[in-house]
Amino acid sequence: MGSVPPVEEHDILVLGAGLSGINTAHVLRDRMPHRQITILEKRDQIGGTWNFFKYPGFRTDSYLNAFGLGWYPWTKPYKMASGPEILDYLKEAVDKDGLEPLIRFKHKITGLEFKTEEQKWTLYVDADGKPKTMRANFVVGCMGYYADNKALEADITGLDTFGGRVVHSQWWPEDLDYKNKRMVLIGSGATAITVIPELVKDAAHVVQLQRSPSYVLSRSTQPIHDWLLHLLLPFTWACAASRWVESVVELLSTEFLLMCPGIGRKVLMDDMKKQLPADVDLNVHFNPSYGPFQQRLGLCPQGDYFKALHKENCEIVTDHIDTVMEDGVVLKSGRKLEADIIVQATGLYFQLFDGIKPRVDGVEIDPGQHYSWRGMALDCMPNAAFIFGYVTSSWTPGANAMAHMVVRLLQTMEKKGAATVVPYIKRTKEVEAQTQLAVSANPGYILKAADRMPKTTGHGPWYGRKNLFVDAMALWFGSMEDGLVYGGFKDKNA
């Protein structure tokens, strides 16, 4: 009978080595060098999203001067890059910062449990096929917000009768040969807008089939302000200034369009009309029922998506599916789209903590039944935070703000001599009446995740993901007492 391996003791565990995990570990180590940081990554390499998706044309749709890491500037002149380029960039950042020794690869979390008497988290880990137990004083979830083992599948009648190949963009097969094939791609979001320009290069015919329209905005791969700043300032200064300019421009434009949706709709639709082929009806295919930035704008570099629609082998259809037959898709209108390949680009399956439901003193914590403290922690969940960026604009500025908020929380604990901190909200009828989702955007995959998403009241510290201004004000001036209960004091007089 083999011996039971000892429990590993850790200080702060960062869960995930994607962009958010890498940045959070850097911020923690930079601001709190006296604390021990360990990163657990379930895959065999870093990168998260950027080593997971493999579909053609996979890229960022945000400028990398805002989306990239503030402490490791993106140096290439173009600011929208492919997935492999971003993965290489993250590897360079990790190497430059010396973070790799902190990462434990092939460490998949299978359980999380906090025990008040221990004032620590116990983590159950599958370490490359071997069970391992770890304890930590504090955990920071940087595991993203979607499942990598399931997608938001559309309920499509007759799909199992299709005689061709059905693929999902989330698991793009390496052996998929679509050259000279007829393809129907179902979806209208960022993935569809990204992959269409690549598919039309080789496919015989590509139809983008959408139930409802989206806004699409063409962007230059090098914004004029970035070019001017690099012309006038030293490189390091120019990178820092460009990051802040882009973040502020995103903030102001997003908030303006949310406050003035009529103006925003007109500006965006006028811009789309100029780039669309004459035979594509703007009011049918690009006239969403929602206002700008209530869902994320589809962004395409140099108008590549619109250029694809100008090609003879590409079209967009707005309709509902009646059924799928052996050789194609029949629409409610009666039209039939013949196909050899059907691609589902139907959205992500939202979840926190990689789908794990943590336990506190034996009680399971369902994130969808709890409130979000400043968009980064759950009520009743001690010594834990999760990093969540912005959904309708560049992810990283929000994720970075949350990483710094974690630092501020840990520093407050140290100042008080507290071993534990837990967000707490009194459940009253007034609170219940004010309950809303922690993410205010309304794309389908968010609305369908309402039961799994943390809640907010919109008052005090109980808010979700807002914008950089709200997060900056909270970081600089927000109370570290309101909504928090500290305990386990080392000094009984504290």
Image (cartoon, rainbow, N blue to C red):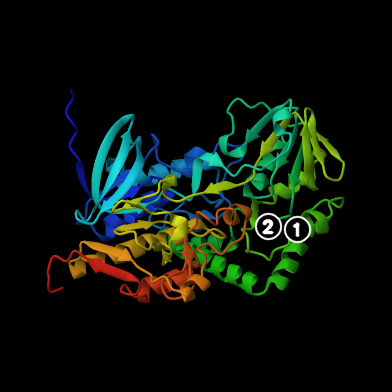
Seen in the image, is 356 located left or right of residue 250? left
* Amino acid type assigned to the residue bearing label 1 in the image: Met
N-term-proximal mark, 2 vs 1: 2
**Label 2: how many Cα within 10 Å (few below 14, some 14–19, many 20+):** some
Q: Which mark is residue 217?
A: 2
Q: Which mark is residue 89?
A: none
Instruction: Give the residue displayed 69% in from the left and 46% down from the top.
Output: 187
The residue that label 1 is drawn on is 272
163 in relation to 422, above or below = above
Seen in the image, is 71 located left or right of residue 242? left
- Which residue occupies the foreground of this view, 217 or 471? 471
427 in relation to 447, above or below = below
Coordinates of residue 90 in the picture (x, y in percent):
42, 45
Coordinates of residue 399 in the picture (x, y in percent):
43, 58
Assess whether mark 1 and mark 2 are in contact (beta carbons under 8 angstroms). Answer: yes
Q: Quadrant of the N terminus?
A: top left
* Amino acid type assigned to the residue bearing label 2 in the image: Leu
Q: Secondary structure at mark 2?
A: strand
Instruction: Give the residue displayed 59% in from the left and 67% down from the top.
Output: 254
